[in-house]
Image (cartoon, rainbow, N blue to C red):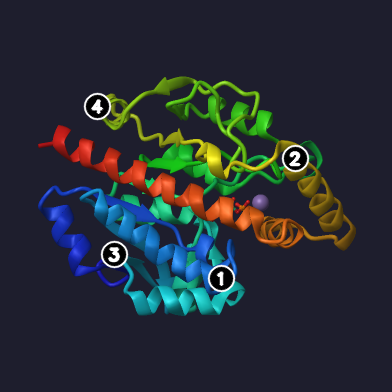
Amino acid sequence: MKNILHISDEVRSALEAGKPVVALESTIISHGMPYPQNVETALKVEEIIRQQGAVPATTAIIGGVLKCGLTTEEIEYLGKKGLECTKCSRRDFPMAIAKKLDGATTVAGTMIIAHLAGIKIFATGGIGGVHRGAEKNMDISADLEELSQTPVMVVCAGAKAILDLPLTREYLETKGVPVLGYGVDEMPAFFTRESGLKADYRVDDPKEAALAFKAQRDMGFNTGMLMTNPIPEEYAMDVALINKTIEDALREADEKGIKGKDITPFLLDRIQQMTEGKSLKSNIELVFNNAKVAGQIAKQLSELEK
Ligand code: PSU
Ligand code: MN
């Protein structure tokens, strides 16, 4: 493990001192947003986490080495390389390491690196889930399986309506993953605050979130936890507009026969183009908001663990 996992000096010292650390993913940089907004967002997210008194740990695979804590140059490199980076979920790690690839880590991949490093809180935009038509195409993101077996709290804005949200919700329930609403009763749907689906429980502040995570660890459960934090009202999208855009993008993907790991990046890109950047703005703002909340939760958790 020593040679394949590289933890930056800053992240390592923070972890050793019991200081709060927040993991961040890199697929959102390479596959989730266009350059240069992807790099600007990634760097700003790190800054927001620092403002909360926590240390950011962006993760990726660079030249086959698992990295926990990237330099600005490395973030810039991944952002420029974009889709040329291998999108790495659990199944991609062995070959990414063996072939010394540059890999961007998905939610699942980031949870793996975070857990190896000893990081418990992770902030992102949205998670992968059960795709529409899963009863036929079996497309269920490895993110859900990872949440069922890796003890990391993922702070996100829910899942995008490109997915089958009710089935995503059911899958998490079956796997024993708590879906918590941060200040809300409903699980949010990424671009919008409402999904029509109830969260398991509402959490009202960072301390309560940290207590829930600690209790899960004290139980000896190895499950992850999903903290769904709704997009701030002022950046939420119009429900009718976003739903129509998603329907159009899904139809296009179907016509073009796009499948597997390419479907999520394709849909994200098309939605950004179709809304002429409006959805990108919302996407960026919700990630900032998640980073802030994750930083606060990490801080509370490190207090509880003292
Ligand atoms: N959803 C988003 N933005 C993203 C992703 C999902 O709104 O950037 C990325 C995340 O990295 C997530 C991955 O883990 O896509 C899920 O891909 P798949 O559905 O192929 O598992
Ligand atoms: Mn998939």
Q: Which residue is mark 1?
A: 86
For residue 59, say whether it is visible. no
Q: Choose the circle earlier in sequence order: 4 or 2.
A: 2
Q: Quadrant of residue 134?
A: top right
Type of residue at label 4? Asp
Task: Tell me how far mark 4 sits from mark 1, CA to CA.
Answer: 36 Å
For residue 112, say whether it is visible. yes
In the rendered image, the vertical position of residue 288 relative to residue 210, given as above or below: below
In the image, 133 versus 184, the foreground residue is 184
Task: Tell me how far mark 3 sits from mark 2, CA to CA.
Answer: 36 Å
Q: Quadrant of residue 260?
A: bottom right
Q: Choose the circle earlier in sequence order: 3 or 2.
A: 3
Q: Which residue is mark 3?
A: 1
Numbered disc 1: secondary structure: strand
Q: Choose the circle earlier in sequence order: 4 or 1.
A: 1
Type of residue at label 1? Thr
Task: Tell me how far mark 4 sits from mark 2, CA to CA.
Answer: 35 Å
Quadrant (top left, top right, bottom left, bottom right) of the N terminus: bottom left
For residue 26, side relative to residue 55 (left or right): right
Type of residue at label 3? Met
Q: Which residue is mark 4?
A: 218
In the rendered image, the vertical position of residue 184 relative to residue 59, given as above or below: above
For residue 63, side relative to residue 131 (left or right): left
- Which residue occupies the extreme front position in the image? 234
Coordinates of residue 46 in the picture (x, y in percent):
34, 60
Coordinates of residue 176 in the picture (x, y in percent):
48, 26
Numbered disc 3: secondary structure: loop
Q: Choose the circle earlier in sequence order: 1 or 2.
A: 1
